[in-house]
Image: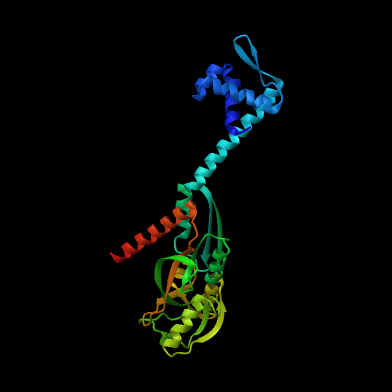
Amino acid sequence: MDIRQLRYFIAIVEERKISAAAERLHISQPPLSQQLKTMENELGTKLIERTGKFLEITEAGRALYKYALQMTQLMEEARMEVKEVGNGESGRLTIGINTFSVTGLQDLLHQFHIKYPKVTYTIQQNESSHLCQLVRDRIVELAIIRLPLELDDFSAIHLYTEPFYFITSNKKQPFNHQIMLTDIQNYPLILPSTEGLGVHYMILEAFAKAQLHPNIIAECSDISLLLDLVACNFGEAIVPETVIKQYKNYNIQAFKITDTELSASTGLIWLKEHHLSKTAQNFTKLLTRHHQQNTDLQGQ
């Protein structure tokens, strides 16, 4: 038996006439009668009996009818779910985000959830290099990472580029001029991230290009702890602008570094030549549209 035959059988049971069932199914009577006979022969039992003008279901037919309803309902639910996943209305968004995250990401996810309430989420936070591996291993489908990184295996969209800031405790005397690397090379610096990873490398490279030797006293990839250390006057730090925007309630002051090309680019990546789910496509459109709008506003 197949699902089509089960639908035929349900119509026969509920209409109690071959003619009425055939009309409901938009087919002629002889093929419908033949399908019923085929089912009875396959099962080796009578499913329908004629009583006067109407058809009556047998005990065996009643058992089949119960399962036929369940199976056709499951098929319809499967069809609807596959359709919803296919157009992105449901499914799962799996995304990795860099340790420094993305400004306004929580608002974007909230917008996405309102538009696609049936979508569920897996969100992993880690360093950019590890996120690349998670995408390769297909643990996450998308990742928002810090550049530059080797991206031969990925398709990528550049989202934005941001400057770096020098941050100190509010207890320190504020600067009354533009901050340059020469001004901060002798301060006890806490580097965000750890050796060999993106932001850490970019900061050291900027000092090296300027032929300066920073006084590094610590490395800390936990941004909340780093900001606590700065606030209590343990040391100073250099961080991307995103950190300043996200962590506003710390007792710190921030000064933009102006004499260097030190900046951080952020991009969205996914596995090259790999079909993105409709859910991931929808989120990608939302994310890129959001950052394009921000770029347009800043350019005005």
> In the shown orientation, is residue 86 left or right of residue 258?
right
Q: Residue 136: horizontal and vertical position, in percent?
A: 55, 65
> In the shown orientation, is residue 292 left or right of residue 204?
left
User: Which color scheme is applied?
Assistant: rainbow
Quadrant showing the N terminus: top right
Judge by depth and name the residue closer to the eye, 193 or 289: 289
Residue at 42%, 58% (x, y): give it. Answer: 287
Residue at 49%, 76% (x, y): give it. Answer: 199
Judge by depth and name the residue closer to the eye, 146 or 150: 150
Q: Residue 42: horizontal and vertical position, in percent?
A: 68, 28
Q: Residue furthest top?
A: 52
Quadrant showing the C terminus: bottom left
**Total number of numbered labels?**
0
Does 75 sit above or below residue 258? above
Residue at 65%, 26% (x, y): give it. Answer: 39
- For residue 46, say whether it is visible: yes
Quadrant in the rendering for residue 210:
bottom left
> In the shown orientation, is residue 128 left or right of residue 161?
right
Does 231 sit above or below residue 69? below
- For residue 118, say whether it is visible: no
Judge by depth and name the residue closer to the eye, 1 or 223: 1
Judge by depth and name the residue closer to the eye, 242 or 166: 242
Q: Residue 229: horizontal and vertical position, in percent?
A: 55, 76
Quadrant in the rendering for residue 21:
top right
